[in-house]
Image: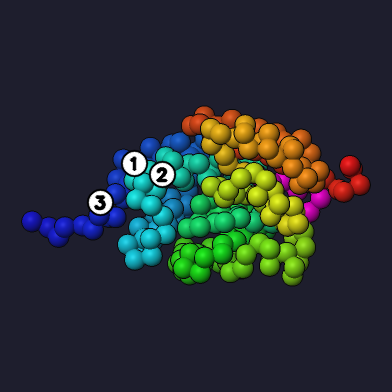
Amino acid sequence: MGKRLPAADRRLPTPDDWATFGRQAAGLVGRSLSADEGRTLEAYVGLLAEWNQTYNLVGPSVLERVLDRHLLDSLTLLPHLGPRQRVADLGSGAGLPGLVLGVFLDLDSRMDLIEGAEKKNRFLRHAVARLGLVNRVRVPGQRAELLVREQPSPYTTVVSRALGSLIYGAELAAPLLETGGNYLALKGERHEEEVTAFLDAPIAQRFAAPRIQRLDAGGVIVILKKVSRETH
């Protein structure tokens, strides 16, 4: 009898799971995934499972549904990212969605994974190096509030997933975004309550009216475009 696999390894996707994911991801990427992209994503999931046994980066349910619920969810943001983008992922955690998106960015774009927890930053730095993404993905190792003091408005796009309320995300994103840049927030079924609260908050004056894109798998992307202060 072969060696028994750790629990995290038993939850890893099977080849059939990856084949299904590849077909679904192609619709979001706009083409079939290349062999290198597929290997990079598989390596990322393997690293996440390996580190999770010691560092508890994500809950068990994340690994059990990592392809259909988490990687695909991350890739729904990709159609909103054009060439030559400067992107920040707020509260990147273990790299969802920013590191996944970074696999598909062109070499003239940059993705910064902004995370406050040092153990998660250690994982992100390790993963970026191991996956060969150092040319377009960075890990500043600072919270957003500190990063903006060094270089205000450095990003064309800010993204987030499972960050907190829309108000909280918008307050962090506004000083990071250039005028005309977009904050893209992945939200679940309670997004209407968050949008209503956001519209009554002072931070709403920094953005145009929210646009909502509904996703086939459930949830939405809330799109907030930053406007100049003089607009209001």
Q: From the image, tell me which residue sits under label 2.
A: 67
Residue at 74 percent of width and 42 percent of height: 201
Looking at the image, residue 212 sits to the left or right of residue 100; the answer is right
Question: What residue range appears in magenta?
Answer: 178-184
Residues at marks 1 and 2 touching, judged by CB atoms closer than 8 Å = yes
Instruction: Name the residue at the left extreme.
Output: 1
Magenta span includes 183: yes
Q: From the image, tell me which residue sits under label 1.
A: 17
Rendered location of residue 204, percent (x, y): 76, 42
Q: From the image, tell me which residue sits under label 3.
A: 10
Residue at 81 percent of width and 43 percent of height: 205
Rendered location of residue 210, percent (x, y): 72, 36
Above or below, 106 against 194 in this view is below
Above or below, 221 against 82 in this view is above
* Mark earlier in primary sequence (3, 1): 3
Q: In which quarter of the image is the C terminus?
A: top right
| Separation (CA) of disc 2 from disc 3 | 15 Å
Q: In which quarter of the image is the N terminus?
A: bottom left
Magenta span includes 212: no
Instruction: Name the residue at the right extreme.
Output: 230
* Mark earlier in primary sequence (1, 2): 1
